Image (spheres, rainbow, N blue to C red):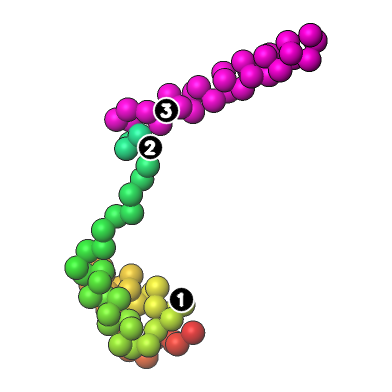
Amino acid sequence: MKKISMLALCAALAGFGVSPVLAQSSGSSASTTMTAKPAHTAKSLECSKEADAKGLHGKARKKFRSACKHGKMAPAGSMDKN
């Protein structure tokens, strides 16, 4: 008898622990909790293609893409291949 009441208590407590999680994921609020990746802009894609053409990788690629997207093209000699 003691075992049954302990199982019932555990089940009840487990139900209370799960209910807030279920309440958050139901309804239209589920779409607001998930964040979607932002779409890449045309400029971003163009800069990525230029970086690919130059064979840039790592920090040099990141630096080049940042300068390209902001219209601040760095001199050609300053980009080291990593």
Q: What's the distance in space between the residues labelled 2 and 1, CA to CA? A: 32 Å
Mark closer to the chain start, 2 or 1: 2
Q: Secondary structure at mark 1?
A: helix
- Image position of 39 (left or right of 22): left
Number of other residues with Cα within 10 Å of mark 1, as a class: few under 14, some 14 to 19, many 20 or more: few
Q: Residue at x 30, y 87 (%)?
A: 53
Q: Which residue is mark 3?
A: 24
Tell me whether circle 3 and circle 2 mark residues in contact (CB < 8 Å). yes
**Image coords of residue 5 (percent x, y):** 73, 10
Q: Which residues are magenta?
A: 1-29
Q: What's the distance in space between the residues labelled 3 and 2, CA to CA? A: 8 Å
Q: What mark, if any, has residue 59 been given in the picture?
A: 1
Mark closer to the chain start, 3 or 1: 3
Q: Dominant secondary structure of the magenta stretch?
A: helix
- Image position of 50 (left or right of 17): left
Number of other residues with Cα within 10 Å of mark 3, as a class: few under 14, some 14 to 19, many 20 or more: few
**Image coords of residue 48 (percent x, y):** 30, 76
- Regarding residue 72, the answer to whether it shows in the image is no
Given residues 3 and 12, the one toward you in this image is 3
Number of other residues with Cα within 10 Å of mark 2, as a class: few under 14, some 14 to 19, many 20 or more: few
**Image coords of residue 15 (percent x, y):** 57, 20
Q: What mark, if any, has residue 33 been given in the picture?
A: 2
Amino acid carrying mark 2 in the image? Thr
- Regarding residue 19, the answer to whether it shows in the image is yes
